[in-house]
Image: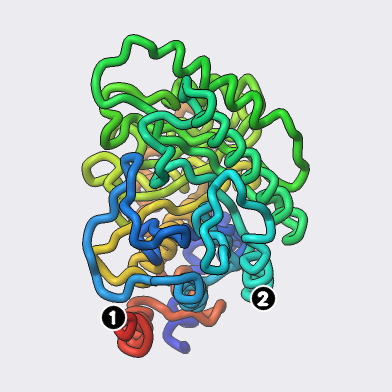
Amino acid sequence: MEQIKESYEIAKKRYEKLGINTDEVIDKLENISISMHCWQTDDVSGFENPEGQLSGGIQATGNYPGKARNMEEVRADIVKVSTLIAGNHRVNIHAIYGDFGGKFVDRDQIDITHFQSWIDWAKKNNLKLDFNSTSFSHPKSGTLTLSNPNDEIRNFWIEHTKRSRAIAEEIGKQQGSPCIMNLWIHDGSKDITVNRLEYRRILKESLDDIFETKYENMKDCIEAKLFGIGAESYTVGSYDFYLGYGAKNNKIVTLDTGHFHLTESVADKISSLLLFTPEVMLHVSRPIRWDSDHVTTMNDDTLDLAREIIRCGALDKVNIGLDYFDASINRIGAYVVGIRATQKCLLQALLEPIETLRQYEANDQLFERLALLEEAKSLPWTAVWDMFCAKNNVPVGEEYIAEIQAYENEVTSKRG
């Protein structure tokens, strides 16, 4: 601990020369909540039919031992993760993760009673909840849900989504913090369609119906996708569709970093969306080959996202969640690596000498701007990170590896 303090004091003085108070930065980072995705624990199985097959373009690759098999194990894994990351965070759950008491409850019949134990559990563990409707992996999923011309199927999914919003509202009310309800559907076509406008018209009408009821304790997010497995030629809920709908109807647009072309800058979209939509929702992952949902790391893409949030002064307008599921490695380890990497990127963004950089830019001192941006990359941010972890009583550096190994040896390896 003494070495951490000594290194921190040196870093603190170095940053002071640039007008940055590292103590204040640590306090800010402690208050940035990241929404942990519960499906990392069990490969998106849920509790309806854990042995069921994934559909709707969803795939979890790998079969590392220790997958959570039920609600108790999912929750235990998340609690373990929360001991290895600093700050107060959120948990993002899908509708298929309800507490159904061993009985089958179809998705157009879910209500708050199936999620009350989640609310109670979250309060007990100092966590907040977010929510998602679930349109995939169901006999009525097919290739079209909310955009389906078939009244029976479409109305089934409309009812499911309405109930999901009502559940999110009650969650938000009970936890005293708005529950973010994300809507993503896989609707699309594997090959050429000649009815693009018609399916999008139907989806728009479905959304209008779903959003007719106004709530005060939840926030609606709509998530686009470039394409999906089985929907390579046409995705009804494209980025253009949801951007237009969100801007017109004052809805939050979700940016999943894996849902765009690999050469697109998702960070560049934030400043535009903030001018036309109330907030932004981020689903952060690491796309190796488009939407491969690899574990988030401290790479340029994630750093750019964090920097743009801070440069826009948008911490109160950008919601940060994770969305990956790697079943090829220790699932708890995947959680912790991704969350800590995201926090490291946010820390570096908070430590950026933005006022000096803005002054250089305003004075057309472009060499000076570029030079300081480069030098900022090698400033002693790691010493601030170590102090952030130590102050919050979580493992410093690679110490968490041993903790996860111990949890695997004592808990997950015994799951069969």
Near-viewer residue (211 or 321): 211
Q: Quadrant of residue 61?
A: bottom left
380 left or right, relative to 119:
left
Mark 2 touches mark 1? (CB < 8 Å): no
Near-viewer residue (29 or 367): 29
Upstream in the sequence, badge 2 or badge 1?
2
Going 44% across and 44% down the picture, which residue do you hit?
305
Going 48% across and 55% down the picture, which residue do you hit?
346
Determine which of the numbered discs, if any, sits on residue 124 in the image. 2
Going 54% across and 49% down the picture, which residue do you hit?
106
> According to the image, label 1 marks what residue?
416
- The x, y position of residue 283, in whole percent, is 45, 46
Going 59% across and 31% down the picture, which residue do you hit?
274
Between marks 2 and 1 in the image, the one whose residue lies nearer the viewer: 1
Near-viewer residue (143 or 74): 143
Disc 2 element = helix
- The x, y position of residue 359, in whole percent, is 54, 36
- The x, y position of residue 374, in whole percent, is 34, 47
Q: Is residue 139 above or below residue 411?
A: above
Q: Please state which amino acid type lies under the numbered disc 2.
A: Lys
Q: Please state which amino acid type lies under the numbered disc 1.
A: Gly
